Image: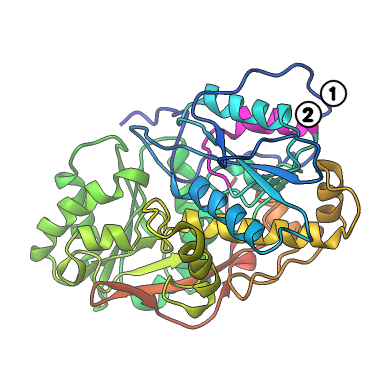
């Protein structure tokens, strides 16, 4: 194990200290690159047409050998079709450009340059692991980034970022706080890299808030093809003890399912140990593919940002998808990326409505956000407002995080269901995290 630095990750990256939540002073970009292959627009719609419509962009990777989020641009396109079918946003037609960032820094930058060239008023509900490539072009043009997935630290530090969830920090802190009362020894299995070094403090902040000892920090390669030795070691560590079931928390990004293959085989010798993890590492599709009720996730606690997919608060989203995108198998209502995109567009709609008949530009959208427009999401999140930020979160490198709430879910009979009603605010817990 070398602790090597990686350039990309599907889980929490290293925090930036001190926080720099200021807009870059670069001048507006001049001539921009031509459209990147893989970028597109809803059929029959072109960006920047000057017809009084509103143009935005959503990007994500798809058809790659790494992380893929095709449901996010698909959901964005479906939202535009649905809202336009019902009169647009405050009477204005919504145009959605989409772009494939291909999971590369070059393509992420090209997507951002296309957004500038097309004069979009915002980038909404997107996923990219290369924030160092896309934020600079957006900031140079003053384009707000609304409702990113929360996969990079910069989404919680940059002044033009307006996140709708608490990212991995909130999920891990929330998971730790719940496990404190239900688990004996806790073992965290995380990447042996600089990227993984900030995961233990977040989980431990939650454990400490519940009066529990810190988790055993077990390192593992994040590119392994099997984890038999790591699984056995984690099970041994979590089984020592206190009379309570031990818990193993795998946080290996896209390799979490690989670890769980080994865990499922090895756990028969350690019946008093269960798994627990966070949404994004595991979803209903993964639970189904690993055996459902008979699989390794049965009985596991999983923290999420939003209510479970079966909650009736998701019905408006499901109805919209059924109305304009029925049969589009890219759009899974249980996928956290699809859900984040719906919430991001809900926020954007509120901002546009708040501007009335005035001009809709990147500047006016950004000013409305900074001036404290309040966004309600039908109960899918608490009320969102980005002008008021918590000083404690700024001190730990999360200056733009305004929604530290999580939901607690559990796998029962192979299905993710609510373990406890309501949201649980992790603001204080994250503020106490030792990230230095």
Name the image quarter holding the C terminus.
top right
Image quadrant in which you'd find residue 110: top right
Upstream in the sequence, badge 2 or badge 1? 1
The residue wearing badge 1 is 27
Which residue is pictured at 53% across the width and 65% down the height? 320
Image marks 2 and 1: residues in contact by CB distance under 8 Å: yes
Task: Give the number of callouts.
Answer: 2
**Relative to 212, is 192 above or below?**
above
* Residue segment shown in magenta: 126-141
* In the foreground, 151 or 308: 308
**Relative to 126, is 224 above or below?**
above
Residue 132 within the segment the image draws in magenta: yes
How many residues crowd mark 2 within 10 Å: few (<14), some (14–19), many (20+)? some
Q: Secondary structure at mark 1?
A: loop
Which residue is pictured at 23% across the width and 46% down the height? 258
Residue 61 within the segment the image draws in magenta: no
**Relative to 322, is 115 above or below?**
above
Residue farthest to the right? 358
Residue 426 seen in this snapshot: yes
* In the foreground, 311 or 248: 311
What is the chief secondary structure element of the magenta stretch? helix
| Residue 27, image x, y percentages | 84, 23
Which residue is pictured at 84% across the width and 48% down the height? 360
* In the foreground, 223 or 379: 379
Mark number displayed over residue 140 = 2
Name the image quarter holding the N terminus.
top left
């Amino acid at each position: 194990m070398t602790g090597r630095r990686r350039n990309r990750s599907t889980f929490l990256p290293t925090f930036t200290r001190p926080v720099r939540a200021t807009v870059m002073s670069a001048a507006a970009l001049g001539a921009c690159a031509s459209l990147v292959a893989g970028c597109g627009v809803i059929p029959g719609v072109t960006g920047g047409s000057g017809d009084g419509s509103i143009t935005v962009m959503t990007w994500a990777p798809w058809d790659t050998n790494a992380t893929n989020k095709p449901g996010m641009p698909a959901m964005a396109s479906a939202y535009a079709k649905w809202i336009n079918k019902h009169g647009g946003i405050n009477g204005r037609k919504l145009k959605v450009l989409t772009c494939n960032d291909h999971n590369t820094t070059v393509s992420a930058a090209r997507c951002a340059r296309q957004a500038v060239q097309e004069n979009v008023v915002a980038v909404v509900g997107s996923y990219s692991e290369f924030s160092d490539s896309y934020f600079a072009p957006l900031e140079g043009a003053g384009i707000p980034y609304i409702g990113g997935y929360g996969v990079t630290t910069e989404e919680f530090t940059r002044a033009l970022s307006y996140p709708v969830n608490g990212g991995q920090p909130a999920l891990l802190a929330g998971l730790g706080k719940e496990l404190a009362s239900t688990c004996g020894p806790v073992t965290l299995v995380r990447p042996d890299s600089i990227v993984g070094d900030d995961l233990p403090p977040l989980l431990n902040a939650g454990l400490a808030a519940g009066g529990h000892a810190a988790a055993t920090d077990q390192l593992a390669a994040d590119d392994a093809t099997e984890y038999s030795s790591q699984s056995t070691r984690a099970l041994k560590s979590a089984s020592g003890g206190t009379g309570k079931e031990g818990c193993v928390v795998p946080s290996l990004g896209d390799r979490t399912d690989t670890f769980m293959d080994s865990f499922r085989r090895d756990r028969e010798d350690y019946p008093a140990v269960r798994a627990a993890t966070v949404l994004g590492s595991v979803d209903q599709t993964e639970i189904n593919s690993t055996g459902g009720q008979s699989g390794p996730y049965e009985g596991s606690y999983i923290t999420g940002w939003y209510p479970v997919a079966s909650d009736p608060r998701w019905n408006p989203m499901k109805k919209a998808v059924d109305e304009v995108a029925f049969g589009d198998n890219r759009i899974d209502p249980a996928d956290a990326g699809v859900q984040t995109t719906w919430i991001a567009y809900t926020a954007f709609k509120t901002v546009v409505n708040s501007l009335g008949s005035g001009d809709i530009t990147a500047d006016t959208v950004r000013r409305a956000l900074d001036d404290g427009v309040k966004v309600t999401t039908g109960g899918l999140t608490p009320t969102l407002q980005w002008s008021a930020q918590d000083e404690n979160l700024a001190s730990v490198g999360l200056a733009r995080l305004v929604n530290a709430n999580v939901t607690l879910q559990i796998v029962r009979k192979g299905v993710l269901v609510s373990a406890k009603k309501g949201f649980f605010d992790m603001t204080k817990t994250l503020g106490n995290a030792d990230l230095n």
